[in-house]
């Protein structure tokens, strides 16, 4: 495998995306507006209305490549400086949510070492004065992909995972560690095989107590199919099953459908109305309770400028 393997959470990404993404019934309405200024500054506005009636949203802006950030005479290594401006490789993202949380994230890509990405994320709640800080490290090399997530304010805690890949075969593991308790808090493992036409993965999570097997097949350029089975060894003896398919209707639209072992069927439709304008609609039906109000309908609107 000449390119790095996927991250541990993405070992079964193809099937997970097919089963979970672009089904719009999970919220009554979703809105996302993206725009980018000529100087490289991007803006993103998100809003979501839940079926329960609550509405949430956020506004974020990102400075990429070489943002015009003045740092005076201070030099922070290993970030390279040219005069008083930051060199390419740094991204600064700031967001403000409707729950009055201020988020700031600094990303430094391929500057500390080739293939390494470092992120420092901080959040602040003005009403309660709560502060959060996290450090995330990602290291990619041919046949190897490792990540480390540190929560500096809680614990502190660390979650580390790694994946080895060769000729399509994948093997990975994950572990969580609480520094204050000096104890391993979680662990998981996964194996898989992935090529462009199909992929398969087996994952053992929740301290090797929940097992899932996922399969994805790209039948042709217009049809995709996938399935996932899940069994909780500490719960009931039942196996959860989900089956999904995607059909590319034409170059600008597609339809998706899925059904699970509990009889919940979901349908979705996505269309690119014009350049930068995408609309999606979805419905979820409880086939065992067709006469009851257990069904959900949702819409999604996305604008890119």
Image (tube, rainbow, N blue to C red):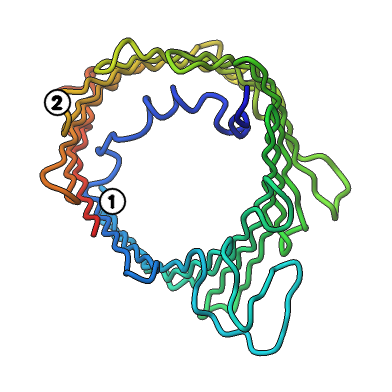
| Residue 32 position by quadrant | bottom left
Residue depth check, mark 2 versus mark 1: number of the one nearer the observer? 2
Residue at 73% in and 80% down: 75
Query: In the current view of this chain or complex, which residue is farthest to the left?
Result: 273
| Coordinates of residue 25 in the picture (x, y in percent) | 25, 38
**Number of other residues with Cα within 10 Å of mark 2, as a class: few under 14, some 14 to 19, many 20 or more:** few
Residue at 27% in and 21% down: 246
| Coordinates of residue 105 in the picture (x, y in percent) | 56, 65
Q: Is residue 186 left or right of residue 64?
A: right
| Residue 6 position by quadrant | top right
| Coordinates of residue 250 in the picture (x, y in percent) | 14, 26
**As displayed, is residue 198 above or below residue 39?**
above
Query: In the current view of this chain or complex, which residue is farthest to the bottom?
Result: 72
**As displayed, is residue 155 above or below residue 182?**
below
| Coordinates of residue 149 in the picture (x, y in percent) | 69, 50
Disc 1: which residue: 50
Secondary structure beneath label 2: strand
Frontmost residue, 45 versus 170: 170
Q: How far apart in space, not on screen, are marks 2 and 1 (Cα)?
A: 31 Å
Q: Quadrant of the N terminus?
A: top right
Disc 2: which residue: 250
Q: Which numbered dot is residue 28?
A: none
Secondary structure beneath label 1: loop
**As displayed, is residue 263 above or below residue 66?**
above
**Earlier sequence position, callout 2 versus callout 1:** 1
């Amino acid at each position: 495998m000449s390119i790095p393997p996927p991250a541990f959470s993405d070992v079964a990404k193809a099937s997970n995306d097919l089963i979970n993404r672009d089904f719009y019934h999970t919220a009554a309405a979703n809105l996302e507006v993206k725009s980018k200024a000529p100087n490289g500054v991007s803006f993103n506005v998100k809003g979501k209305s839940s079926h329960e009636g609550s509405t949430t949203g956020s506004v974020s802006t990102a400075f990429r490549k070489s943002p015009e950030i003045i740092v005076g005479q201070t030099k922070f290594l290993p970030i390279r400086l040219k005069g008083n401006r930051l060199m390419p490789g740094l991204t600064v993202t700031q967001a403000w949510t409707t729950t009055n949380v201020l988020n700031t994230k600094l990303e430094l890509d391929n500057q500390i070492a080739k293939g390494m990405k470092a992120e420092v994320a901080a959040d602040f709640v003005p009403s309660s004065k709560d502060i959060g800080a996290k450090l995330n490290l990602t290291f990619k090399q041919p046949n190897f992909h490792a990540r480390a997530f540190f929560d500096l304010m809680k614990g502190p805690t660390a979650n580390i995972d790694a994946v080895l890949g060769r000729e399509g075969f994948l093997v990975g593991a994950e572990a969580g560690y609480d520094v204050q308790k000096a104890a391993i808090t979680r662990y998981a493992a996964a194996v898989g095989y992935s090529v462009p036409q199909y992929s398969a993965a087996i994952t053992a999570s929740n301290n090797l107590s929940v097992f899932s097997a996922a399969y994805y097949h790209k039948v042709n350029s217009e049809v995709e199919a996938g399935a996932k089975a899940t069994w909780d060894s500490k719960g009931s003896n039942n196996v959860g099953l989900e089956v999904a398919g995607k059909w590319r209707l034409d170059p600008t639209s597609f339809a998706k459908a899925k059904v699970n072992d509990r009889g919940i069927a979901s349908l979705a439709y996505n269309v690119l109305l014009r350049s930068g304008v995408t609309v999606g609609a979805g419905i979820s039906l409880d086939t065992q309770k067709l006469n009851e109000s257990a069904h959900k309908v949702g819409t999604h609107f996305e604008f890119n400028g």
